Amino acid sequence: MRKAAQLGFGGVYVRTDVGGSGLSRLDTSVIFEALATGCTSTTAYISIHNMCAWMIDTFGSEEQRHKFCPPLCTMEKFASYCLTEPGSGSDAASLLTSAKQQGDHYLLNGSKAFISGGGESDIYVVMCRTGGPGPKGISCIIVEKGTPGLSFGKKEKKVGWNSQPTRAVIFEDCAVPVANRIGNEGQGFVIAMKGLNGGRINVASCSLGAAHASVILTRDHLSVRKQFGEPLANNQYLQFKLADMATRLVASRLIIRNAAVALQEEREDAVALCSMAKLFATDECFAICNQALQMHGGYGYLKDYAVQQYVRDSRVHQILEGSNEVMRMLISRSLFQE
């Protein structure tokens, strides 16, 4: 990943004065699609790392920006995003991890679940409750690795995304300087949601890469695999299946790129478009990968063949960064608000 950072991929849409590449959301989507054709899992982690760096760059003070962003952009340090809890997944505003101010520190107690990079990352961007119930009681605080009271659960055994560790992040009277709070008290949920709009574009772009690679692998497999005395590529049914896969891939790419432009331009419909892109593209791209595996026959089920890895790595994209059921909720809400 540090080699990727040398190419500017550690802070793709972070401002240049703190070491970022200063690129657009559209540029970012193109980059993450290309990277994900190689390793979807590693690219997905890089996208989360970028989201954390962007949050600090966008909502942090100048002192925070210049302290945290440069080592994140070089990937000298890695970042993890801590929102989900054992009892609050889709209902993120009900999170319970608390941060009680004591002098010039916050005392954090609680736990976060399914944290990519947990235990390995150096910086944890944590959403925690500094006020009352609901979204307005949530603040965003940076917790650095090595802080007393910070610990981690066991490394989870996952279907995919196995190039990155996933652990619970646990806070037990974890004392963090008030100076590590990003933005004002009560601003955390807004920061979290704005970060996730971009995160949805990013993870959908990772799905694009997986699907793109799967289409190419399937094309090549059909060209060399023979059954009934001729290449499978001569079978019109399989030709049509591949054509459908390619069409769905391009449709997914276009809806993502459109949403990326809307987010960059801060358009009013950006939230709905990001939700649509995440919903449509992650569903379609997983279906493409799954169909690609089927068209490889028994070989597709072997770990010696890369197509199974794209299936396993892209499946979780329908769940994280807001499940696709939540995406439907956000889209329908926007329609009724028009």
Image (cartoon, rainbow, N blue to C red):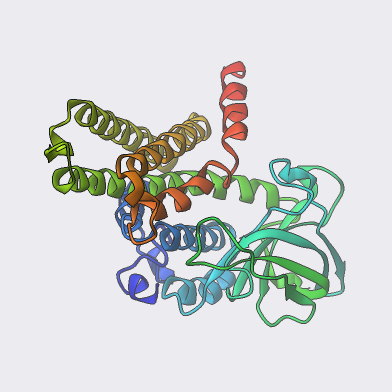
Q: Is residue 29 visible?
A: no
- Please say if 204 is above or below 128: above
Displayed quadrant of residue 38: bottom left
Q: How many marks?
A: 0
Displayed quadrant of residue 40: bottom left
**Split into 4 quadrants, where in the image is the N terminus?**
bottom left
| Residue at figure coordinates x 35%, y 63% from the top left | 21
Q: Is residue 146 visible?
A: yes
* Residue 42 % position (x, y): 43, 63
Could you say which is closer to the camera, residue 126 or residue 131? 126
* Residue 215 % position (x, y): 27, 43
- Please say if 135 is above or below 104: above
Displayed quadrant of residue 235: top left
| Residue at figure coordinates x 58%, y 47% from the top left | 320
Q: Is 54 placed left or right of 107 in the picture?
A: left
* Residue 237 % position (x, y): 23, 26
* Residue 183 % position (x, y): 66, 58
Farthest residue to the front: give it: 228
Q: Is 232 placed left or right of 20 in the picture?
A: left
**Split into 4 quadrants, where in the image is the C terminus?**
top right
| Residue at figure coordinates x 58%, y 59% from the top left | 158
| Residue at figure coordinates x 65%, y 78% from the top left | 145
